[in-house]
Image (cartoon, helix red, strand yellow):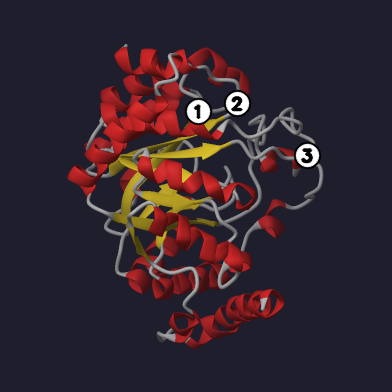
Amino acid sequence: MQLIKKLEEFKILDLMEKANKITLQEHGPHITLERAIFLSWWCDKGDCAFCYMSTQKSNIENPKTARRKVNAILAEAELCRRMGWNIEFLSGGYGSFSTSEIKSIAHKIYDITKKPVWLNIGITQDIEKYGEEIEGITGAVEMANPEKQKKVCPSKSIEEISNMLEIAGGLGFKKAITIILGLGETISDLKYLFEIIHDLKIDRIIFYSLNAHQNTPFENYPQPASLYYAGVVAATRIKFPKLEIICGTWVDNLANMGPLILSGANGLTKFPLFKMFGTAYGKRVEEEVYWSGRKLKGTFTDFDRLSQGFSEEKLEPYIKRYIDKCLKNKSINE
């Protein structure tokens, strides 16, 4: 394929230039800030080679203790609304919450934000039980090459994920996948990714770069090269002009954001929100968007917006706790 060949020939700047023009034409100049809201730190499967949750089974005697309090989840959603952030998806490991509990949480968030949420809760057979509170279903593919994916994620096959997404599409839900770069994939593996996006009519893709966790097989692996990451995003944008692309990077790699935006990203994610808000790191995110010639939806620095809004009384202690954390970080950085 021509796009793969251009990557192999290191013509990344050419790809980025073309991808940038396509993005502005198809999506406009706005960049969103995205926040994945976690429901729990437990996973029944616990065998994805890169995942933090794979290190937790021996540390947690009762999985229920790893579940977050629902009011804390709802408070986080309310603050995202105030700050103009999108909720990337609700995420939880296998076996953390029941379908009825997830539906209830999603509906309460829908009442708060007036927007349906995405789910990323593993391979589920209960999609038909969800309704207006859900916008789409996310399949955590991680690696598109099926043979490599089996080794990295032995308990969640691409075939099962694909079947789930086909069911979701048939029920009228949008479809998304997540991909992690830096797990040992090659440029030629892009053909598998493009096949998945095309065959399943994927609406949204979330790219992450590897964040190595201790006590996993990848603990000594570095993050992927920044221009490689940008090149993969640019090639994907060119191949699929209307696809929504979200890119995740880490606090130690914020300079990735400008190239990723110019390569086709519509949104940015994977930040420790309440540690970064109002700090120089939060300001850097806004600067990366500014110097990319884009307009940011949401804020990483406007403290006035933290207190703009009303919520249920039972959420106020949790909201205050989050705001106090932001204010503490601000005072440390002044």
The disc, 2 or 3, on the residue closer to the chain's N-terminal end is 2
Q: Which of 62 and 299 is in front in this view?
A: 299
Mark 1–mark 3 distance (CA, rounded to whole Å): 24 Å
Residue at 38% across, 69% down: 84
Kind of residue at disc 3: Gln
* Residue contact at pointers 1 and 2, CB within 8 angstroms: no
The disc, 1 or 3, on the residue closer to the chain's N-terminal end is 3
Mark 2–mark 3 distance (CA, rounded to whole Å): 15 Å
Residue at 50% across, 73% down: 301
Residue 211 visible here: yes
Residue 99, given in percent of the width and then of the height, sits at: 46, 51
Q: Is mark 2 on a helix, strand or loop?
A: loop
Q: Which of 249 and 228 is in front in this view?
A: 228
Are there few (<14), some (14-19), or many (20+) residues within 10 Å of tag 3?
few
Residue at the left extreme of this rendering: 25
77 relative position to 130: left or right = right
Q: What element carries label 3?
A: loop
Kind of residue at disc 1: Tyr
Residue at 60% across, 67% down: 280
On the image, numbered disc 2 is attached to which residue? 183
Residue 126 visible here: no
On the image, numbered disc 1 is attached to which residue? 228
Residue 331, given in percent of the width and then of the height, sits at: 68, 81
Q: In which quarter of the image is the C terminus?
A: bottom right
On the image, numbered disc 3 is attached to which residue? 214
